[in-house]
Image (spheres, helix red, strand yellow):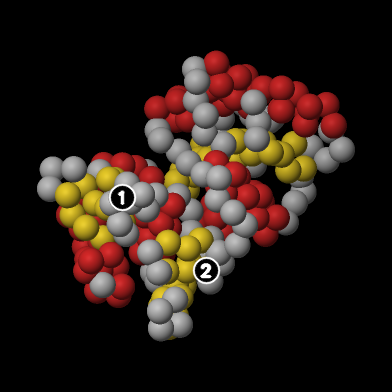
Amino acid sequence: MRLLLVEDDALLSDRLRGELQRAGFAVDVTDNGVDAGFMGGSEPYDMVVLDIGLPGRSGLEVLRDWRAAGNPMPVLVLTARDAWHEKVDGFKAGADDYLSKPFHTAELIARLHALLRRGIARPPGPLQAAGLELDEEAQTVRVTATDATVELTGTEFRLLRYLMLHPGRVLSKSRLVEHVYDFDAERDSNVLEVYINRLRRKFGRDLIATRRGQGYVFGTDDA
């Protein structure tokens, strides 16, 4: 899943980026409201972590503009401790959740996973689809038929999670690339095919079907 982190505290931003990447997110970072407004309006992010106090433009202004343009991506705002008015203003502007500074990264990641489940009407618990159960913390997969546990690389995990969140749907190469990789990653579609084939070798070729000229389908295509 691809995430935009908007935070002007360089030390906090660097730390969060690394921890979010280790948690399986492809992360793009900006430190000001002007760039945040443009990036959030032009790139297909799955969610945003947005600090309210930003140079250039405030986080609330940016959020209001996104919502006014009909942009529905989940947004978690970061607020100052005990600043209840920031929380209220954030919800009024269209925030989906908030977290007060300072905070534990584990809580931030848990809240992001909750937003993901809410956005796709996913029940609590491990992500399951097509006979696989994904452990999002350990970034491993349990094959339910054999109870075998399979380890994944970071890119394999991000790709498989996105596929499992959309079973039975035709997903184009461009859509997968946009949601699995950040700006700095290699975005060649041939690289994506390499990772698709790696997943097929681990879980069976029939698990991910190729639709020529359209993309890929995970699991059955009648969902």
Give the crowd class for mark 1: few <14, some 14-19, many >=20 residues within 10 Å.
Answer: few
The amino acid on which the numbered mark 2 sits, given as a three-letter code, is Asp
Which residue lies under the disc numbered 1?
Answer: 222
Closer-to-camera residue (181/159): 159
Q: What amino acid is labelled 1 in the image?
A: Asp
Q: Residue at x 49, y 17 (%)?
A: 69
Q: In the rendered structure, find residue 113 and report the number of the disc placed on it.
A: none
**Image coords of residue 10 (percent x, y):** 60, 44
Q: At x 85% / y 32%, what residue is drawn?
A: 84
Which residue has dot 2 on it? Answer: 135
Q: Nearer the viewer, residue 192 or 80?
A: 192
Residue at figure coordinates x 87%, y 38% from the top left: 82
Kindly state the secondary structure of the residue where label 1 is placed: loop
Could you tell me how far apart the alpha carbons at marks 1 and 2 are, in whole angstroms? 25 Å
Residue 203 versus residue 74 in the image, above or below = below
The reply to whether the C-beta atoms of the residues labelled 1 and 2 are less than 8 Å apart is no
Residue 147 image-quadrant placement: bottom left
**Label 2, residues with CA under 10 Å away: few <14, some 14-19, many ≥20:** some
Image: 202 above or below 191: below
Camera-side mark, 1 or 2: 1
| Residue 85 sits in quarter | top right
Is residue 35 among the parts visible in the rendering? no
- Residue 131 in picture, x, y percent from top left: 40, 69
Q: In the displayed structure, would residue 9 be above or below residue 92?
A: below
Q: Which residue is found at the position 52% from the left and 29% from the top? A: 72
User: Which one is nearer the viewer's eye here, 180 or 78?
Assistant: 180
Is 104 displayed left or right of 200 in the figure? right
